[in-house]
Amino acid sequence: MAAAPPEKFFEGDTPHGLVKRIIYKKYLQAYVAKTQRLKTIIIDGFAGAGRYGNTWPIDIEKYGSPMIALLVALQFLCRKRLLIPWLFNIYMSESLEWDQLQGDMVRTIQEESEAIIPRQSGYECSKKKMYLYFIEKDGKCFTQLVKCVKTYLYIFLRQLGINNHLIVKQGANHGYETVDFYITHKDFPLECHISNCEFKDFEPPQMPEWSRRLTFLDPFGYSDTPMEQVRKYVDDHSEVFINFMSHQVNDAIEKIAALYGIPLRQFVLNIIRMGENTPATNAKNCSRSYIEHIKEYTGAEYALMFEIRGRKNAVIYHLIHFTHHRKGLEAMKESMNTCSQYEGTFKMSDYRIVCEGIALTIGNQQDDAIVAEDVYREFRGKQGVPIGDVETFVWEHSPYVYRKKILKILETSDPPRLISVVNEDTEEERVRRRNTYPDWGKWLLTFADEDFEDVLSGLKALKL
């Protein structure tokens, strides 16, 4: 069946699409807050129209990915303003939080024409801290996205009384159309560039000094994301979040092999060798193979994968995140954890929502007692284990997120499985309270060495 045209795709929404955008939004919120000590670059390689249908939602995650990036950036800058008391008289009252501002914005946009031409100030602010790049090859989606960004920025700045601080420039770059937005007010150091071209033809912008870059790639297929192009976006200062269309692996073997830049025969043998030669297994193995190739090509140290299934409970795609930094891994794992429907793995299925009637619950559903079991399996009988080793095990070698509560479970079980917690820093005078693990200490942990089955029984019987 032929895929729907891009502009038709953005007329509706799906549960798995919402989950994908929630993960992206939550990660962006953590990423922007962390990187704004430096400079933040966000690139959306397949931006789309910016929103679904003709509505202007209040919730950020109900927009398309480029608008999510823009709104998260403005949300951060807006909330940062609330921390500076003297700005209240200029922009808003102390009671006006982001949610109220966003609600007022949406109502205003719905009441007014979207074909608003912003007034322009006569200069560009040079001290930018946030750079957004949206790439869209489809002409209709490009036009809709430009209109969406222009309308939103103008109304947003007007709500704050600074609508004369927006410059819009149209031009051409390397033969394709571009529209550039510059906010010139010093308290909103942001610029946004929208390009009407294919991702494979887009050259990464030069990174300013002391900057960090996140690239989001959500294509309709494989041919637009060749490995050689993707590797340009992963380095010590950059990371990539990819929607990998793994469900097409059995129908698009040749395209995927070309994507990897390796012979077809070698690719097929690699996939089959990793497991049973079935459509479902091939899809997951293909994604794992893609992760291995990206890490080999780019040197990315960490990778996470989130599985998305459709109405028939078949794999549709995998969301894959690559980063060089442990903090990036932790933030993405937290984001994925809030959307997983299954214990011990990052996965959701439209089938459970549409066909089984199970509500989509967003939040941390992790059972820390199960994580404690895994930790005890790894460290049973070991003495003087630095607490950082436990953190590393959970973050990097398990499908869970690290919580100090895991150690509390082990220390308070009957009998105790964590039998000693001592501070390596002998000069520290503070004394920890039992079942706490303050950050000021360099804690060394000793785990009991008892019959493992008894340990598991004790943990499972523990009521939290």
Image (cartoon, grey):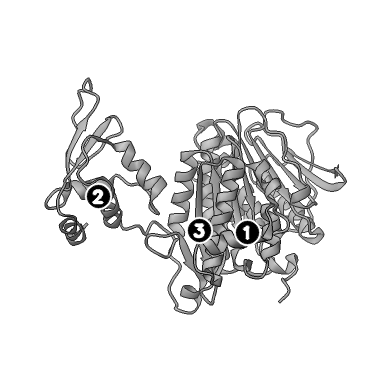
Above or below residue 320? Residue 161 is above
Q: Which residue is mark 1?
A: 267
Picture quarter containing residue 453? bottom left
Q: CA distance from mark 1 to mark 2?
A: 39 Å
| Identity, as a three-letter code, of the amino acid under mark 2 | Tyr
Q: Are marks 3 and 2 in contact (CB under 8 Å)?
A: no
Above or below residue 226? Residue 237 is above
The kind of secondary structure element at disc 2 is: helix
Q: Residues within 10 Å of mark 3 (few under 14, many from 20)?
A: many
Which numbered disc, 1 or 2, marks the residue closer to the eye? 1
Give residue 390's position: percent from left, percent from top: 31, 42
Give the mark nearer the N terminus: 3 vs 1: 1
Which residue occupies the extreme top position in the image?
427
Tell me which residue sits at (14%, 50%) in the image: 450
Q: Give the quadrant of the N terminus.
A: bottom right
Q: Give the quadrant of the C terminus.
A: bottom left
Give the mark nearer the N terminus: 1 vs 2: 1
| Identity, as a three-letter code, of the amino acid under mark 1 | Phe
Tag shown at residue 25: none
Above or below residue 8? Residue 214 is above
Give residue 318's position: percent from left, percent from top: 55, 60
Q: Is residue 101 left or right of residue 253?
A: left
Q: Which residue is mark 2?
A: 376
Q: Which residue is mark 3?
A: 306
The kind of secondary structure element at disc 1 is: helix
